[in-house]
Image: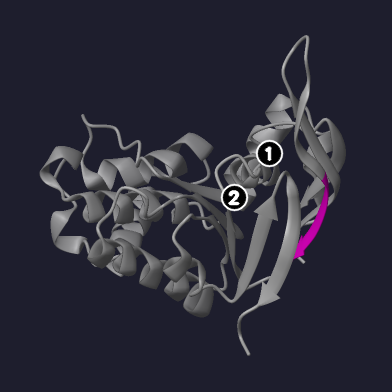
């Protein structure tokens, strides 16, 4: 398996603690496309952030491709994120002063394992795979919302992660562009073997995943295999 959590709990607050995630255990296997649904406040985004080593649990552990993220210091978790994980959020967070190509290159240059030329070539391959090859010289404000989100997915894929974690990736898109983004995720799973875990409130899109988790009051109350 590529992603696992054991007895995961998270409390928020200072003087009065609120338990937003309670004793969650989960195993996600390679090439799975998992959707996480639930009402607002059910804990789904908290779970995603803990799985992505963006936050620390109050109790329990998170294993990313066999590495215990909970045991790492901040630097170790940053390395783990850069090597194993890609993130896609509701807001694309593209840097407005850079072109599409430059935005996708940045994570590779920051990681420092590719030369500038190699990063550029790989970025072009990833951008082309997203159907955006002709737009690589444009800046984010010259793109539609759907195109911007596909660039953010390209950026997430650029470091060749084992896992993509997506938090409401279609939340700001119309239905047509949402369908395009979902097709991209399905392609990443099918053709590149990337595991995708996606938080969404959109039931139609959640149903396209191979597995659906339903959360309520900080717990997983349903775990449904949708491949049958």
Mark sitting earlier along the chain (1/2):
1
Residue 3 in percent (x, y) is at 73, 58
Question: In which quadrant will I find the N terminus?
Answer: bottom right
Residue appearing at x 13%, y 61% in the figure: 134
Q: Is residue 27 magenta?
A: yes
Disc number for residue 53: 1
23 left or right of 38?
Answer: right
Foreground of the two, 204 or 107: 204
Q: Position of residue 189 (x, y in %)?
A: 52, 73
Q: Are marks 1 and 2 in contact (CB under 8 Å)?
A: yes
Under circle 2, the secondary element is: strand
Question: In the figure, is residue 122 to the left or right of 165?
Answer: left
Residue 94 image position (x, y, % from top left) = 31, 37
Q: Which mark is residue 19?
A: none
Could you tell me which residue is drawn at 59 percent across and 76 percent down?
Answer: 210
Q: Quadrant of the C terminus?
A: bottom right
Which residue corresponds to mark 2? Answer: 85
Residue 31 appears in view: yes
Q: To which quarter of the image does residue 215 belong?
A: bottom right
First to last magenta residue range: 23-29
Residue, x 39% and y 49% (percent of image)? 155
Q: Is residue 17 above or below residue 57?
A: above
- Disc 2 crowd rating (10 Å Cα; few below 14, some 14-19, many 20+) is many
On the rendered structure, is 131 left or right of 164?
A: left
Dominant secondary structure (helix, strand or loop) of the stretch shown in magenta: strand
Label 1's element? loop
Q: Please determine whether, in this image, residue 54 is positioned above or below residue 8.
A: above
Front residue of 223/217: it is 217
Residue 10 in which image quadrant: top right
Residue 45 percent location from the top left of the image = 59, 43
């Amino acid at each position: 398996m590529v992603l696992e959590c054991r007895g995961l709990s998270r409390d928020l607050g200072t003087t009065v603690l609120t338990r937003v995630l309670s004793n969650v255990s989960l195993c996600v296997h390679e090439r799975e496309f998992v959707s996480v649904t639930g009402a607002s406040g059910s804990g789904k985004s908290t779970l995603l952030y803990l799985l992505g080593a963006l936050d620390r649990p109050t109790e329990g552990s998170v294993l990313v491709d066999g590495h215990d993220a909970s045991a790492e210091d901040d630097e170790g978790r940053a390395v783990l994120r850069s090597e194993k994980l890609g993130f896609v959020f509701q807001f694309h967070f593209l840097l407005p002063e850079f072109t599409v190509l430059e935005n996708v290159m940045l994570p590779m240059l920051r990681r420092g394992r590719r030369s500038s030329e190699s990063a550029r070539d790989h970025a072009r391959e990833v951008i082309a795979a997203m159907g955006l090859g002709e737009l690589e010289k444009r800046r984010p404000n010259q793109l539609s919302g759907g195109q911007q989100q596909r660039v953010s997915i390209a950026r997430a894929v650029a470091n060749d992660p084992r896992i993509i974690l997506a938090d409401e990736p279609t939340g700001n898109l119309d239905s047509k562009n949402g369908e395009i983004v979902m097709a991209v995720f399905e392609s990443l799973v099918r053709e590149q073997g990337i595991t995708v875990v996606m938080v969404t409130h959109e039931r139609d899109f959640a149903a396209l995943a191979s597995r659906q988790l339903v959360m309520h009051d900080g717990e997983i109350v349903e775990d449904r295999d949708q491949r049958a």
